[in-house]
Amino acid sequence: MVNERYSRQTRFTPFGAEGQEKLSSATAVIVGCGALGTVQASLLARAGAGAIRLIDRDYVEESNLQRQILYTEADARDGLPKAEAARRHLLEANSGILVEAHIADLNPENAADLLADAGVILDATDNFETRYLINDYAVRAATPWIYGAAVGGYGIAMPVLPADSACFRCVYPSPPGGAQPTCETAGVLGPVTSLIGSLQAMEALKILSGRAAAVRRKIFTADLWHGPVRETSMPARDPDCPCCARREFTWLTGRRAPVSLCGRNAVQIHERRRPIDLTRLASQLEGLGEIRGNEFALRFRAGDYHLTVFPDGRAIVKGTTDIGVARGIYARYIGA
Ligand SMILES: [Zn+2]
């Protein structure tokens, strides 16, 4: 029996009741809960995807609200982790689905766990390193994934269907060199992230409803400010691609070093594996600076630096792009 809730969707013949049925038992994994991720998650939750797994390392800030459509001023005020804030709002929209929130940075050590059982993986990250990691996992596990990115008024989207289409490394053999524009340095407009997130969600809907044959195997690009909007054919698979041809999954086997969060004047430290008791840490830090927190993260301000510490030992040090300085702050307040 088809739920009245999804009647407008099942009436669309190519999707139909059978597509709905399949969708309701499928899992979508969304990597990143920023602008693209909130659009994808919102559409897939409302469409009735059986389970949505959200992975994000960051917390909601006021500057997110202009385009990250799930969040509210209260989320930013409370400094809620994005994955948790998104989970709550998605369940308000559809209580009949499962939503998992993972406050984590996708890395080679946790990728196999966090991406397991995905019917499709949606890219809503902001960096090439994580995309190569997703691509390695997806090709190895034969899981389809949808690449997407946006900056300024420009956006791009492309599906990767392992064994069936070119993979991400066939198309982009190595990360772009030099400084790239980011949403922080070059800005970004909400309509372009909503467009790209919607395109990604559409291809995900096809895959999760058993209609992968309908996926548009194209590279879509749009400059919504200056024009044009284009769709070009995907290149053929590279017969010598290190990933999908030679099956060398180097991004899955590497280790993550601390990273400077480009354009954000912040560094993420995630080399520590020992979990941290936030309540204990809060009492240790008492009197040393301003402390705010909730059960998901502790925020601590010392002079010009803002430190956000997560229970898994990860921290974001704001106020510097120097990895050495950030490590020093971490060691001083949290321990080496
Ligand atoms: Zn390839």
Image: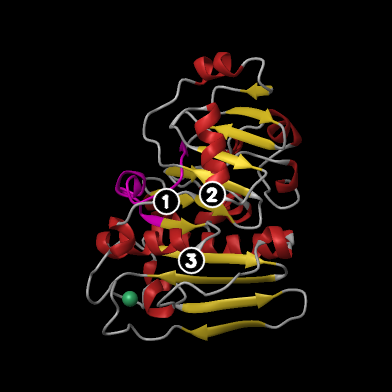
Q: Position of residue 2 (x, y in %)?
A: 45, 45
Image location of residue 214, percent across then percent down: 43, 72
Does 189 sit left or right of 199 as displayed? right
Secondary structure of the residue carrying numbered label 2: helix
Quarter of the rendered image showing ligand 1: bottom left
- Answer yes or no: disc 2 within 8 Å of ligand 1: no
Which residue is label 1 attached to?
257
Check if mark 1's residue and mark 2's residue have beta carbons within 8 Å: yes
Q: How dense is the environment of label 1, judged by Cα within 10 Å: few (below 14), some, or many (20 and up)? A: few
Q: Is residue 139 above or below residue 53?
A: below
The image's mark for residue 147 is 3
- Check disc 1 and give the amino acid type: Ala
**Residue in the image at 69% along x and 65% along y:** 192
Asked if residue 118 lies in the magenta stretch, the reply is yes
Question: Total number of numbered labels?
Answer: 3
Out of 198 and 172, give the one closest to the viewer: 172
Task: Give the vertical position of 224 relative to 317 (above or below).
Answer: below
> Answer yes or no: do the residues labelled 3 and 2 have beta carbons within 8 Å?
no
- The residue identified by callout 2 is 323
Q: Nearer the viewer, mark 3 or mark 1?
A: 1
